[in-house]
Image (tube, rainbow, N blue to C red):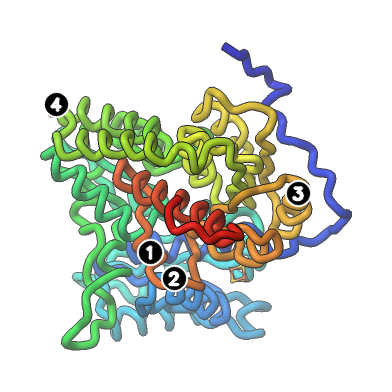
Amino acid sequence: MKVISAKDLELDEPQFKHCTGTRNACKLCTPLGACLAFRGVEGAIPFLHGSQGCSTYIRRYLISHFREPIDIASSNFSEDSAVFGGASNFKAGVANVVRQYKPKMVAVATTCLSETIGEDMTRLFHDYMKEEWFEGHPHMVKVSTPSYSGTHIDGFHAAVRALVATLAVPGDRTRRVNLFSGMVSAADLRYLKEVLEDHKVPYTLLPDYSESMDGETWSEYEKLQSGGTPIADIMASGCAQTSIEFGRTLSEYPSAGKFLSERFNVPNRQLGLPIGIRETDAFFEALAEVSGEPTPVKHTRERGRLVDSLIDGHKYVFEKRAIVYGEEDLVVGIASFLSEIGVVPVLCASGGKSGRLKRSLHDAIPTLDDRTHIHDGIDFAQIGEMADTLRADFIIGSSKGYQLSRKLDVPLIRIGFPIHDRIGGHRVLHLGYRGAQSLYDTIVNALMDVKQTNSPIGYSYL
Ligand code: SF4
């Protein structure tokens, strides 16, 4: 067994063309992640303390991916607010939203501008509540999300932590399991609920935007789409028997699970995103332990069919080379899955900078060798420079990699967020044996398509 030294865990020193700025970031705006997490709470409206442009940009990104409307309120900073502070805009804005939307929660995230001028959000909340509070007023939650010091994933995790830190209450221990899934697709959330229900354990899945961001057609317009984690369930998270949170890079992070563990002694298990067989096995083992039930046969059969299909398709994927990019934990999960099926992840790249990417990849993939380059804090221009020499057979990540796939003339396997150039990005299933099956079929078929297209004969039997 190879012993990993501290030197091995230092990230490769990038030798890129000198450039002081970020060119096409491989990450998104921090409050975007917070807004999505907040829309995963029943009756919550996200409210940005900052300029309208931030809320418009975030809405555009979310709508183009989910193909659903989303309202994000804003305190609408003007030049005056940027100089003298946005206290009056904040007060008027929140009061308007409460009156017009009648939400169950107003969930406030800061933006670059309000953070830069040093808005004292605790004082703003205090002053607002002193003047505007009434019996039955919606819950108020706030999170600090300066985009220049993080990514959309940092905003997402910070918002989830803020929700439990504000709402969870102590009480008698219950059988409940808290599941903090991270920023996964609507299809992934529905899958996780099915798995939890199959294990017959009461649960708090936070957040849950599987309906609010992927709902049915309405007979009448809904200002705030239904669905989302009930507020009562978030309150009950402090009495749960355990928390499970996905994210190998979260170990140093002040996460929701860690908060509940420190404040209410709720044991916290941090697992990798359950992508591929190894990481999904760990998730099902944890569920069997906390539920006291063996893995339901429906899921063991899905695992068996997956293993069988890996044998069927092995000759098409073995030793193929892939570039993986995106959020750090997604990169870890996908790279782990690729290694299982015989694909070499020649580059694992992320715009995130948790400092845990390399360690997490080595933990998840014991066989990782020096054919894999690992870079955090990287942008798409730098990924493109590296890709020139890597001879990748395909790339896998969000639709932001389309230009790269076009330049390399290799398939792009669209996963994660955002997917803006295809329909159904939010219905891509990544998690569990079922998600691995779907990803596997997509990857193998993309490679078979390349082989078929490039064949001078045009075989119809591959
Ligand atoms: S200014 Fe900051 S918070 Fe606003 S959209 Fe840009 S990155 Fe996001």
Could you give the CA–CA distance between mark 1 and mark 2, rounded to whole angstroms?
A: 7 Å
Question: Where residue 218 sits in the image (x, y, percent)?
Answer: 20, 83
In this picture, is 460 found above or below 437?
A: below
Q: Which label's residue is closer to the chain start, 4 or 2?
A: 2
Q: Which SS class for mark 3?
A: helix
Q: Which SS class for mark 1?
A: helix
Question: Where residue 248 sits in the image (x, y, percent)?
Answer: 48, 35
Q: Mark 4 or mark 1, which is nearer to you?
A: 1
Question: Which quadrant holds residue 200?
Answer: top left
Q: Which label's residue is closer to the chain start, 4 or 3?
A: 4
Could you give the CA–CA distance between mark 2 and mark 3, rounded to whole angstroms?
A: 28 Å
In this picture, is 45 found above or below 388?
A: below
Q: Which SS class for mark 4?
A: loop
Q: Mark 4 or mark 3, which is nearer to you?
A: 3
Which residue is tagged 4? 292
Could you give the CA–CA distance between mark 4 and mark 3, rounded to whole angstroms?
A: 48 Å
Residue farthest to the front? 457
Question: Which quadrant holds residue 302?
Answer: top left
Q: Which SS class for mark 2?
A: helix
Could you give the CA–CA distance between mark 4 and mark 1, rounded to whole angstroms?
A: 32 Å
Q: Which label's residue is closer to the chain start, 4 or 1?
A: 4
Could you give the CA–CA distance between mark 1 and mark 3, rounded to whole angstroms?
A: 29 Å
CB within 8 Å, label 1 to label 3: no
Which residue is tagged 3? 386
Under mark 4, the amino acid is: Gly
Q: Which label's residue is closer to the chain start, 2 or 3?
A: 2
Question: Which quadrant holds residue 246?
Answer: top left
In this picture, is 134 found above or below 162?
A: below
Q: Which label's residue is closer to the chain start, 1 or 2?
A: 2
Which residue is tagged 1? 426
Foreground pick, 321 / 76: 321
CB within 8 Å, label 1 to label 2: yes
